[in-house]
Every structure is written in C-alpha cells, then in structure tokens.
Image (tube, coloured by chain):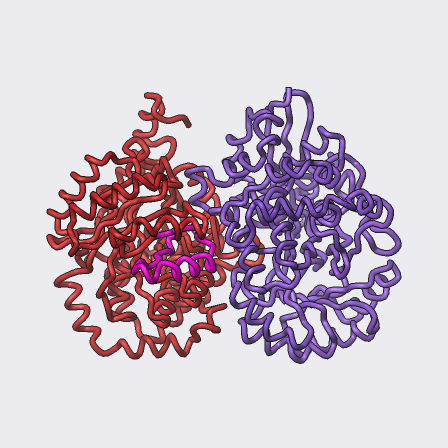
Chain colours: A purple, B red
Amino acid sequence: MTQIISLECNDVRFPTSLKAHGSDAMHTDPDYSCAYVTVRTAGGHQGYGLTFTIGRGTEIVVQAVKSLSFLVLKKRAYEDIFRKFGEFWRELTSESQLRWLGPEKGVMHLAAAAIVNALWDLWARMEKKPLWKLLVDLSTEELLSCIDLRYTSNVMTRNDAFKILMELNPGKEEREAEMRQSGYPAYTTQAGWLGYSPEKVRQQCEDLMQRGFTAFKIKVGQDLQSDIERCKMVREIIGDDKILMVDANQRWEVQEAIDWMKPLAPFKPLWIEEPTSPDDILGHAEIAEALEPLGIGVATGEMCCNRVMFKQFLQAKAMKYCQIDSCRVGGVNEILAILLMAKHCNVKVCPHAGGVGLCEMVQHLQIFDYISISGEKEGRFIEHVAEEHEHFVNPCILNETACYIAPLAPGYSTQFKTSVLEQYAFPYGTEWKRLIANGYFKN
Amino acid sequence: MTQIISLECNDVRFPTSLKAHGSDAMHTDPDYSCAYVTVRTAGGHQGYGLTFTIGRGTEIVVQAVKSLSFLVLKKRAYEDIFRKFGEFWRELTSESQLRWLGPEKGVMHLAAAAIVNALWDLWARMEKKPLWKLLVDLSTEELLSCIDLRYTSNVMTRNDAFKILMELNPGKEEREAEMRQSGYPAYTTQAGWLGYSPEKVRQQCEDLMQRGFTAFKIKVGQDLQSDIERCKMVREIIGDDKILMVDANQRWEVQEAIDWMKPLAPFKPLWIEEPTSPDDILGHAEIAEALEPLGIGVATGEMCCNRVMFKQFLQAKAMKYCQIDSCRVGGVNEILAILLMAKHCNVKVCPHAGGVGLCEMVQHLQIFDYISISGEKEGRFIEHVAEEHEHFVNPCILNETACYIAPLAPGYSTQFKTSVLEQYAFPYGTEWKRLIANGYFKN
C-alpha cells in the first residue's frame, strides 16, 4: 500500500518580473517559478515537492524530473526508500547513464531535489509530523542512513558525523520547546532590490523595522556610487545596533570584489554575499582573507551545487556564512550532509530563501539544525521575503519579533493550493493565458 | 544572407552497451549518444555540432538546446555572432533566467556546447577551412574577441592571454607544416575497459602496438587485486619503454585513491585519471601531492564543468594533465580560455576523447593549441578510441605511427552521414525500432 504509483511534475510560474521584486545584478527580470512534483502511493498518501527556478527553462527541469521518475515509480515508500534513504538517494543521483549530465549539479540536481523533497514531504505526512520534527525524532542511526557521505571523508568521516549527532542528543527537548515557543530569527532581503528607488528603499526599511526585523540585506554591484549612497541611507535608517548585509550576486572578479567592498566597509556590513563566481572556492577564500580585517565576512551557497563544493568552501575558509538552498543541492538528504560538515568546520548556516517555497522549506531545516546539529542560533538567521507565500496551503509565518514560528502541519510545507495549478501552470493556466493575450508576455 | 534561419536538434544514440565498450567503474553500460545540432543560414550554409552523452537523458539536453535556441535564431552569423563571439557566448550562457539552471554547468552547458560547436563548424565551413586552420588564421585580437574571460583575472588577465598568443606568433608556419606532415600523437584507451577479459586485454594490447601506439590507458578502481594483475600484465606486454596510464573514473575517496595507487606504482603509470569527485579541487591537490614522489601525475578534466573550475585545478596544482572535453564546457570559446590558462600555468593538455565525435573535435583543438598557444607536444597525447567514427562524413584518421593526421575538410568534422539520423535517431530510427522490437532495449 505504500508503493509509489504516480509521479507528476508541473511547470508553475508567477509573473514576478512585472513587479521588479527579486531583481539583482545578474538576474534582472526573474519570474519566480518552480518544477512542482506530486507523488502518490497506492494507499492514497501524497507528497509535494518543488525546485525553485526563475522562469524560462523550467520546462527543462520538468523534463529532467520525468526522465528520473523511473527510479521512483513502483518503489515501496518505506522498504525501498525511507529505510535506506541514503542508498536510494545515490541511485537517483548516480544512475549510470544520467550521471553524465551532472554529475550532481545543474538541471539534474535541481530535478533530483524536487523529487527528493516530495518524498520527504510524503514521509512526514505519513508520520503525521512536520518535517523538522520527523528529523528530530529519527535515531542517530536512522538519520545517518539517510545521508550519502561519498567524497566527504577527507574532511568529515561518518564517525565524525555520528559524534556530532550524539553530542547534541542532550538538550534536544529544551531546544525543541524553545523553537515551539519563540521560533527562529529571520533577516529580510526586501529592503533593497536593485529595481527599487531610494524612496522605496527608505519606506521599506521603516516598514520592516516596524514588523520587528533587526537584520536587513540589500543588493549591490551595479554601480559603486549608488551602492555607497544606498548603504549609507540604510545604515542611517536602521541605526548602528541593527545588522546590514550586502549581496553582489556574483557580479565581480576577485580583486574587484575586494576593491568594491572597501568603500562600503564604513557602513559595517556583516557579510558580502556571492562576491564572485559561485564555483570559485579559491577566489572566495582570497576575498575572505582580504576582507576579514575590515570585519566583513563572506557568505555564499545558494548556487553551490553539491556537498563536494560545500566541503571545499568550508575547508578553504572561503565561506563564513553557509547559505544552503533547499533545492540547489539534492534535497534534504544532501543538506543533512552539509549541515553536519558546517558544524564540523564551525561555520554558521544562514539559509537562502525567498523565491517560491524556499522560506517554507528552510524553516524546517534550520529548526532541525538548531535542535539536533548545531545547538546554536546566535548570529544566525533565515532569509525572509514576504512574497509568494499566499500560494501555499501552509505558508511560513513570522511572529512579531520577526522569527519564523515552528510549523506544525504534517509535511514540508510545500503543498500548493489547488487553484495555483489552474492559474499559474505555464503556459496554459488562466493567469498566463490572460497575461499572454494582453501582451505582457510572449509564449 | 548569413542570418540563422533554423536550429534543429536530434537525439541520436548508438547501442554500444551491447558490446561493453566504454564500460568503467562508474558508467557500467553506456550507450554512446549525442544531442546533434544543425544550424542553417538564409544563404544555404549549414553547421553541425554535438554534445556527447551516454544514453538516457539525451532528451533533456535536446530540450535544453530547444530552450536556448531563441538566443541564436534570426542572428546574423558574422555581424551578431562571429565578430563578437565572446559577447555572444556570454549572452548564450548567462541569459538572465536560464543561468539559474547552471550557471555554466551540467545540462545547460552541455546544450550550450552543442550549439556553440555547430556555430564554429558553420563559421569554418563558410571560410572553407578546417576549424583548426580557421583558429590559426585569426589575428590575436580576433581570437581574444571570441573568449569570455569573466572570473579568470586573478589567475590570468586578458593581457596575459594576449602576451601568450603574441609570443607564439613566431614559428606558427613551421608548426603548421609539421602538423600537416606528421600529425599529433594519440594514446589509446582500448587496451582495458572493465568489461574486458584478461585474454581480450592481452590481444588488444598486441593489436594496438602493431598499429603504432606507444601509450596505453586502462581502467581501474573496481577491485585492487585485479587492477594489480591487469597493470602487471599490460606493463609486461608493452614493455618499459611505452607509456601506461590508469583511469579510476571518480571511484575513490581522497585517501582511498592514495592508498589504492601505491601498489600500482611499481607498474609506473604516467597518470591516475579521475581518482575522485570531478568537483574536488582540493582533494585532487591532496592526491597529487601524495603521489608526486611516486612519479604518478594526476589527470582530470573530462567532467570539469567550466573555466572557473579549471582555473582552480590549475591554481592549486591539482592537475598535472589537463583533459579538456570538447562538449562538457561551453564549446570552442571556453576551451580557448582553458588552453590559455593551461599554458599560463605550465600544465600539459591531453584532451579527453572517445565517445561520439570527441576524437573528431579535439584533434582540431590540440593541433591549434600546438601551433598557436603551447608550441609544445612533448609528453602530450590526444586520447583515441577506434569506435563510432564510421558515422561521420569526415572521420578522424590515425597514421601508421598512431598520430592524428591534420583534418583538411572545412568545418569541425562533426557532420553525421545522412543515414545516421534515419537509423539511430532515438527512439524512432530504424535500428532502434528493430532493437526495441527484438527485446534488446525498452523504450
């Protein structure tokens, strides 16, 4: 009855480029989108998972999900997947012919993430628990059996991972109670998208402070003078006791990043995010070393493609803040490996969110991390953007101190309302037909 | 008249898994395949390009080519592409929404390579030159205008690249004449696929020596004892004056690679290829350092996904032999950047080949590299596998000393005979219909 009998994948897009939300130095006109996976068991259980995209090309990820689906269909959820999830995960990500197209990166890994995330949602629903609680309640052995640690052993062995988890067993109940009561701190990225005017930035900052935020991220990298002015303005508005972060979205060469950040140092940004190519471990290490005396840390990870790349960023001290993305690497299983390595290397995890469903997912991961892996939340935040949550059955919720409150509904919080597919399936949903007919978009 | 009026992409597969050719520790049953691109101009010129795949998933790359094609269609070949090829290349690989799916890696980059390779074939045909000669005849400025050096400047600046090319200008004519007369040395990978029996390995080695080969690569990594026996046997057959290379196809952890290679050292392999994850720069550096005293170099690159990753492998002394692949990175333009960085860092380039069309392509690249970039060929070889050449209009040819002879037909040697699409288009070509009907394959 737990056999997986169907795996469906939809191309869902929201026309966010009409609003200039989400614009940055490299992604000037994103339409927040996703490949949305639904798995169903013979017994009538369902799981929903997605991988975030920004418009064009979502159809490629949908094709990749379909090409991977033969590895999932007909499997029994517990016997063939959940009870040896690490093994299953490797089958899915290292299939002998498909692995040529990655391995473990790009379209194939985004597609694997959507599938894997749907399977975790299914598992959590079958256990009638929110995902974070499912993870917290797994035994150390069960948790480790979900993780493929291939290629990590020169930095962290399975035994190292085991020790981390065992050490954190004491105090789990208190930390869980704390999460249920106070939630997990968020920072906001909505103070300054590049598409916003100075007036809009000012108004946003003031609104966000009233909503309880104490940490604010703005985009930089298009024009130095306007970056200086924007940082100055935001710092004045938020005051010296609040936190400012800046994000260049891969805009610079290595030396350029160092040179650009020096005149921004007086405004005391906590971190510079994605200063250069997301693949450039040694480049990030060079930037991190140069900016350390200025008190600026390097943050990256949203486009870091797998645990082997994260391993090296951690090893090389190339990231001070580890920004895991819930869909870029191969879903929950691989994120567990990265959370463990970050703890092992003493690096703070501050997940990437925003987009579609990323906030919904990473709240589970970060709450689990606090309870079972890191045991710390000082100086850590989950990114937050207050857009595109209305599409979800169980959207994430922030309390009055801008903390994510621990989600309680069973699953991974990634189920769309049924109206979403009718309206936003691309290109034949009702909203897309209307937008295309009215000339806002071409098909 | 040079406007690109169509871009067609076909899924072409050859049933090589029936023969156990190409089997290795990670890819046990490859069906050598490709996404095959044909571009046509209003004036009736055509260009043919491909990206190599190993069976399942080729349909995903085909979808990606189709999704990228809007960036090519209606462009004028010279004005919009060839005369500012570096700019065009960046548009193709950094489109503001599609780049999320890479950037510059995996399916998207394989698809970009197929398109870019077809455009170079078109250009060479329009100039009535083989690709290598088109490249040799471009001025230094023209050549540099084809290359996007984004993210490389901390290791090699545009000025460094300019100097390399200028320094090699003297002697180009002599080296070209030498290439036309003697060709470029090959090594063979056909001595020992993992699917072969010891008798088959012995027979292959003897045949290959008779055909003039002096360098032989075998696969290792499945079982240490059988690797020892196979290395011992091959070394005995080929003698001490010939070259042996071994290839693990990413099979090992970092320390495991070091430990596994020690007992193989007595058989004096020139290099160990792909000892671990292709993404693990620092891991390869660790292996390289440990094996250097044993006289074993580290070779990798066939799955190195872009110039930023190559840059770091070169920077970290993690590769002694740089095995560029003509389809894995974004086609000829990005390979030019990598060839220049390899020269700048004094690392030998020995291209990955075999598969479908890789030998046909890399011969052009390596001959150009010898004439215009490195000026050296001592201790360098182009990989060779004597399979799947019969499908091409202009297959590569080795002379009696196992050297690739310089191709003379216009283009990049990647045009299939017309019968290929009829027979091997998947799944409706006549051969596939026959194989599926007879139960050899499922569709």
At x 47%, y 47%, the residue is: A102
| Residue B136 lies in quadrant | bottom left
Residue A241 shown in magenta: no
| Residue B158 lies in quadrant | bottom left
Residue B287 shown in magenta: yes
Number of marks in the image?
0
- Determine whether B166 is above or below A364 in the image: below
| Residue A89: % across, % down | 55, 38
Compared across the picture, whether A345 is left or right of B86 comes to right
| Residue B419: % across, % down | 26, 37
Towards the viewer: A350 or B332: A350
Compared across the picture, whether B121 is left or right of A356 comes to left
| Residue B89: % across, % down | 44, 62
| Residue A200 lies in quadrant | bottom right
Q: Which quarter of the figure is the N terminus of chain A placed in?
A: top right
| Residue A8: % across, % down | 60, 32
Q: Could one spot residue B360 in this view of the protein?
A: no
Q: Which residues are magenta?
A: B273-302
At x 25%, y 71%, the residue is: B375
- Determine whether A217 is above or below B384 in the image: below
Q: Could one spot residue A157 in this view of the protein?
A: yes
Towards the viewer: A389 or A91: A91
Compared across the picture, whether B210 is left or right of B438 comes to left
